[in-house]
Amino acid sequence: MPIAPNNNNEQLTSWLLAASEGDQSAFRQLAQTLGPRMYGLAARLCDGNSAVAQDVVQEVLIKLWQQAPRWQSGGSVAAFASRLVYTTAMDHHRRKGSTISLSADDAPEIPEPETVTGQIEQTQTRRQLLGALSQLPERQQQAVALAYFHEYRAQDIATALGTTEKAVESLLVRARKSLATLLPASLNPSS
């Protein structure tokens, strides 16, 4: 899900523009509004590590303050903040020599089975899905995670990945084709 709904973009833009002129109160409002969602996204991208997620949010707030004077009105402040969270989390992972992993918690919700056998099958399904996803190129993994696990729209994924919507659509098409060959027929909706 994006950091904040677009219906509030006018208010977010007004706070960011005021912050660009040094208005600390406006920046505080912006931080209080975006902060919880930024933290939620950072925590998911940092495998639930609260300390790292807090560091990411702190860095993003500093970047927002520093970049506010260069803000071009007309874009989505929430998408801009999402991209900063995403790239900052990626930077943290790169510094530590790791990549963002797809965990079982990130897999789409599958209805709770009523039997032990059903629970075992559900666990196996999640493992198969995550195993297939891990075989995709990193950019495809990122696009799939943002689209299907975090429910981002193509526009927000493009902003987060620093690419175009058309490129995102292409990444998702290639990922779906790859998953169709990697997943067993029982999990493949196109078979």
Image: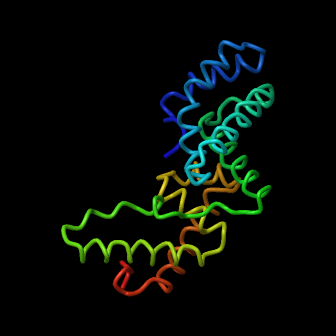
Q: With respect to residue 98, does 63 lie above or below?
A: above
Q: Residue at x 52, y 78 (%)?
A: 132
* Residue 122, horizontal then vertical, whole percent: 33, 72
* Residue 129 drawn at (x, y percent): 46, 74
Specify whether 111 is left or right of 191.
left
Name which residue lies at 60% across and 52% down. 45
Question: In this image, 64 relative to 82: left or right?
Answer: right
Quadrant of res 174: bottom right
Q: Front-most of 132 and 158?
A: 132
Q: Give the answer, above or below, for where 51 lies relative to 102.
A: above
* Residue 1 pos. (x, y %): 49, 46
Q: Quadrant of residue 94?
A: bottom right
14 lies above or below 128: above
**Viewer-proximal residue among 125 and 176:** 125
Q: Quadrant of residue 128?
A: bottom left
- The residue at the point 52 percent across, 35 percent down is 4
Looking at the rendered structure, the number of numbered marks drawn on it comes to 0
**Rendered-image quadrant of the C terminus:** bottom left
Where residue 68 appears, as percent x and y from the top left, is 76, 27
* Residue occupying the far left of the picture: 114
Please state which of residues 157 and 142 is positioned toward the viewer in this rendering: 142
Give the residue displayed 58% in from the left and 54% down from the top: 47
